[in-house]
Image (cartoon, rainbow, N blue to C red):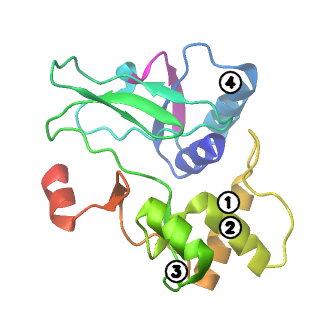
Amino acid sequence: MANGLLQLLVRGGDAVLVVAERPPRPLQALVERLNAEGPGQALFVPSAAAALAEGRLLVAASSTGAACACPSCRPDPSSSTWHNRSISFTILSGNDVLVLDGEYVRLPRPLAGGLWHRVYGTVTGQGRHIFACFAEPMLLALAGDAACRSVGRDVPVERLDALADLAARHGFFVDRLHANGRPVAPARLARFSA
């Protein structure tokens, strides 16, 4: 997914800093190709600290299942460490860093009854949202498609676009931003963006 996100951002005209101390050759080749195609550009930086600055957005994703290690942007004795399954980094305890979850997708209907609701709803605290990794196979099943979509290092943008089209057609969408599994209030987003 990381490579797919990179392609979407560069093809959308964004300037992207790619964190890689020693970029693997396939990633170098992808960045060279994307830079040649434009309209955006990608540039390698050696660490997340080199990419972070006030007002910047850091998107962390892993195509290999390995964890992304992202240190805090500034030393602070009151900092704490935040972890999820694939990203680990130190965040400041103040209001200058907002960590958003990228995995919640709204279902067309709320979860209802049965083992799925009891286990998933109880563990995640969600009644209307599921992780995107669960939504993807649901959408493919609804379409009668048994092909893998977002597996491996090379996920063509066309596959991501087709999956987004399926989601729209079946009523799956992202309606709220989440932080630490809970919806972020619009007022908090407004304060943070100000």
Please report contact status of discs 1 and 2: CB closer than 8 Å, yes or no: yes
Q: Amino acid at mark 1?
A: Leu
- Answer whether labels 3 and 4 touch (C-beta < 8 Å): no
Disc on res. 163? 2
Residue at the image position 70 percent from the left and 20 percent from the top: 24
Q: Which residue is mark 3?
A: 111
**Is the residue under label 2 in contact with that under label 3 (CB below 8 Å)?**
no
Q: Do labels 4 and 1 touch, CB within 8 Å? A: no
The numbered mark, 4 or 1, whose residue comes first in the sequence reads 4
Q: Is residue 53 magenta?
A: no
Report if residue 45 lies within the magenta region. yes
> What residue sits right under mark 1 in the picture?
160
Disc 3, SS:
loop
Image position, residue 113 (x, y; %) = 55, 84
Labels 1, 3: front one: 3
The answer to whether residue 137 is above or below residue 15 is: below
Residue at horizontal 63 percent and vertical 63 percent from the top: 134
Horizontally, is 22 left or right of 129 in the view?
A: right
Residue at the location (73% across, 60% down)? 158
- Residue 28: image tag: 4
Decide which of tag 3 and tag 2 comes sooner along the chain. Answer: 3
Residue 67, x across and y down, in percent: 56, 30
Other residues around mark 4 within 10 Å, as few (<14) / some (14–19) / many (≥20): some
